[in-house]
């Protein structure tokens, strides 16, 4: 069974084609700068070589068509005909309270996804463009929506509600939803497989740390809390997002700087976090280099970043009443040994102990904890696309 996974952004399309019978990736790549004259498709070949094909992509349907041309081409193709594609799975960022699991896309489902766009105005409309493109090009191929928010729909109401007038929840759905659900679901299950533990009777904290970041508390196979909220701004300090901030500060700045709601959105989403504090970059590799060169603001940004991860994990250890497994994933979680070391040393009161040699690993599935550690600590590279493909296969 061959399943295409699409992740459509406002100006981008990422894709992976899976052979689910052999559980392998047949093709992968992505289009960037849709709508601009320097748009291009980057293909990752089986030997990890990157090929860039420049072409003006005015909108998503043209982009999907260009991807299909390459999938069936003599030079870069891996299938002879589009008829070999059995289904398409889409990453959809926000499912609100309507979707607690993956669903096959019907006209009714599409309308409900559109109705959730108010909760994710930067993401859901782009995801819908991908769905519409496939409907136009491959109208008879079944499509499945897999939601970033669905895994966290098992949170209890006392965890997801904000302490605001209840009427805002009733009228507008104002509550915490959480994100990165596909990643948290995949790495928590994979960690238990890797360690030989029963997923449905294990207390797990998953730390998805990258340009965006979130922590999740998972008990007996269900998410019971997560650090992101109604939007991806809440929670950890991130590459360009502020994470938690006193709302009084926002009101103070709006008055002092004469800022609009749109101005505030730009500040907390695109100008804050690692980039805002360091003044250098949102990329942790640039921050580490600057720290090594003695840059004090870069050092402050890194200390704040690490501290908030530890703080959230400590809070989730409390609500779980103990931890069996701690999982690191995401670009930083999989590759940055210093952040993992800082966090694990700060959890020594829980009996966490890691092997310094194992912690030097980058981007590989590995157990970091020693035999004496009371908590199993692992790095599990995330594979959200495979999880989407698996959910799609199960539904189809």
Image: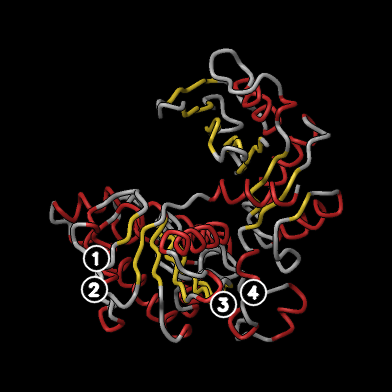
The reply to whether the C-beta atoms of the residues labelled 2 and 4 are less than 8 Å apart is no
Disc 3 crowd rating (10 Å Cα; few below 14, some 14-19, many 20+) is many
Question: Residue 43 in the image: x percent, y percent?
Answer: 50, 27
323 shown above or below 51: below
Residue 240, above or below 216: above
Q: Which residue is mark 1?
A: 341
Q: Residues within 10 Å of mark 2 (few under 14, many from 20)?
A: some
The image position of residue 121, as x and y in percent, is 66, 55
Looking at the rendered structure, which numbered label has been put on residue 154? 4
Mark 2 vs 1: CB contact within 8 A: yes
Residue at x-position 40% and y-position 71%: 325
Q: CA distance from mark 4 to mark 1?
A: 31 Å
Task: Name the side, left or right, on which 159 lies relative to 330.
Answer: right
In primary-sequence order, the first of circles 4 and 1 is 4
Mark closest to the chain's N terminus, 1 or 3: 3
Structural distance between the alpha carbons of marks 2 and 1 = 6 Å
Would you say the residues marked 2 and 3 are in contact, meaning their CB atoms lie under 8 Å apart?
no
Calculate the distance from the C-alpha at mark 4 to the C-alpha at mark 3.
6 Å
Q: CA distance from mark 2 to mark 4?
A: 31 Å
Q: Which mark is residue 345?
A: 2
Q: Residue at x 58, y 20 (%)?
A: 77
Tell me which label, 2 or 3, sits earlier in the chain. Answer: 3
* Residue closest to the eye, 106 or 212: 106
Horizontal side, residue 53 vs residue 388: left or right: left
Residue at left 32%, top 50%? Answer: 281
Q: Earlier in the sequence, mark 2 or mark 4?
A: 4
Seen in the picture, residue 189 relative to 49 is either above or below; the reply is below
- Element assignment for label 2: helix
């Amino acid at each position: 069974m061959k399943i295409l996974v699409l992740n459509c952004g406002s100006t981008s399309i990422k894709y992976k084609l899976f052979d689910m019978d052999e559980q392998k990736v047949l093709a992968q790549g992505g289009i960037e700068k849709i709508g601009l004259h320097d748009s291009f498709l980057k293909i990752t070949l089986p030997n990890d070589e990157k090929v860039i094909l420049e072409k003006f992509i005015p909108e998503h349907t043209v982009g999907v068509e260009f991807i299909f041309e390459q999938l069936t081409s003599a030079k870069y193709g891996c299938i002879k005909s589009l008829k070999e594609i059995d289904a398409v799975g889409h990453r959809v960022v926000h499912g609100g309270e309507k979707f607690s699991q993956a669903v096959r896309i019907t006209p009714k489902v599409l309308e409900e996804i559109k109705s959730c766009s108010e909760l994710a105005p930067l993401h859901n409309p782009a995801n819908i463009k991908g769905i519409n493109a496939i409907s136009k090009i491959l109208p008879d191929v079944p499509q499945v929506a897999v939601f970033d928010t669905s895994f966290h729909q098992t949170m209890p109401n006392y965890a997801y509600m904000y302490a605001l007038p209840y009427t805002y929840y009733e009228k507008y759905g104002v509550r915490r939803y959480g994100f990165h659900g596909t990643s948290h679901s995949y790495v928590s299950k994979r960690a238990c497989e890797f360690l030989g533990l029963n997923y449905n009777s294990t207390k797990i904290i998953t730390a998805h740390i990258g340009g965006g970041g979130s922590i999740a508390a998972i008990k007996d196979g269900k998410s019971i809390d997560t650090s992101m909220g109604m939007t991806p701004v809440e929670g950890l300090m991130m590459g360009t997002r502020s994470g938690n901030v006193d709302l009084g500060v926002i009101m103070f700045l709006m008055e002092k700087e004469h800022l609009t709601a749109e101005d505030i959105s730009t500040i907390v989403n695109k100008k804050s976090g690692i980039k805002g504090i360091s003044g250098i970059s949102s990329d942790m590799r640039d921050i580490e280099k600057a720290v090594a060169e003695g840059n004090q603001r870069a050092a402050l940004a890194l200390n704040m970043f690490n501290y908030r991860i530890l703080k959230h994990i400590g809070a989730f250890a409390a609500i779980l009443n103990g931890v069996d497994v701690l999982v690191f994933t995401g670009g930083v979680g999989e590759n940055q040994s210093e952040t993992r070391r800082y966090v694990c040393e700060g959890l020594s009161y829980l009996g966490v102990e890691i092997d310094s040699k194992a912690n030097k690993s980058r981007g590989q599935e590995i157990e970091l904890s020693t035999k004496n550690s009371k908590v199993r600590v692992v790095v599990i590279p995330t594979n959200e696309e495979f999880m989407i493909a698996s959910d799609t296969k199960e539904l189809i």
